[in-house]
Image (tube, grey):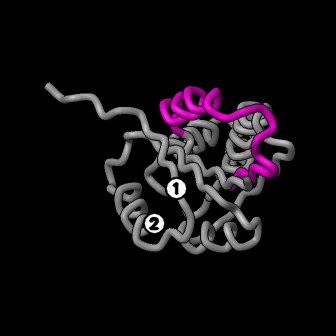
Amino acid sequence: MRMLVCWDGSGHALGALRDVMPLFREQAVELAEILLVTWPARDIARWSDIYERQIVTDDLHRAAAEVTAEEMQLLEEIIRPIARRVTSSMADGPYIEIMTAAIERTNADLVLILIGTHDASGIIAQTMQEWAQSASIPTLVLRPPVTARV
């Protein structure tokens, strides 16, 4: 099996991935490609971290590169036990187009999308609706449960 893994930077979504990893046998995945779409800036968890890092680096592009690199390393560590080979890449541009191209490039059989519940702008919901209509392979969306507001 070949797997494509995408993440919005949410800690809760990362927790969901950690919960799912024991369901896979060791080395069951031939290739796990981690793909993090960074630019353009979006109202997602990754960008909250990037803006915080920008205060320290005083450079938005550097902050984005550092945060994305750290996220890729973290995902690699979590996924490595189930995959014979793990690769990572960062991409910029329209999410759906990038994902579709990555599926073709890697010949992926499964997509794991890790998303949190922070979506004030609705960009995640909109993108997931588009993905559901266009996805060419099975997709597992790992998302923490939405808590009820009182």
Compared to residue 8, the image places residue 97 above or below, namely: below
> Disc 1 on helix, strand or loop?
strand
Q: Residue at x 53, y 31 (%)?
A: 11
Quarter of image, res 81:
top right
Quarter of image, res 75:
top right
Quarter of image, res 82:
top right
Q: Nearer the viewer, mark 1 or mark 2?
A: 1
Circle 2: is it few (<14), some (14-19), or many (20+) Cα within 10 Å?
some
Give the Cα separation between the discs numbered 1 and 2. Answer: 9 Å
> Disc 2 on helix, strand or loop?
helix
Q: Which residue is mark 2?
A: 131
Compared to residue 107, the image places residue 18 above or below, namely: above
Q: Which residue is mark 1?
A: 139
Q: Earlier in the sequence, mark 1 or mark 2?
A: 2
Label 1–label 2 contact, CB within 8 A? yes
In-image side of 101 versus 12 (left or right): right
Which x, y percent locates residue 93? 60, 70
Which x, y percent locates residue 144? 41, 33
- Magenta range is 10-35
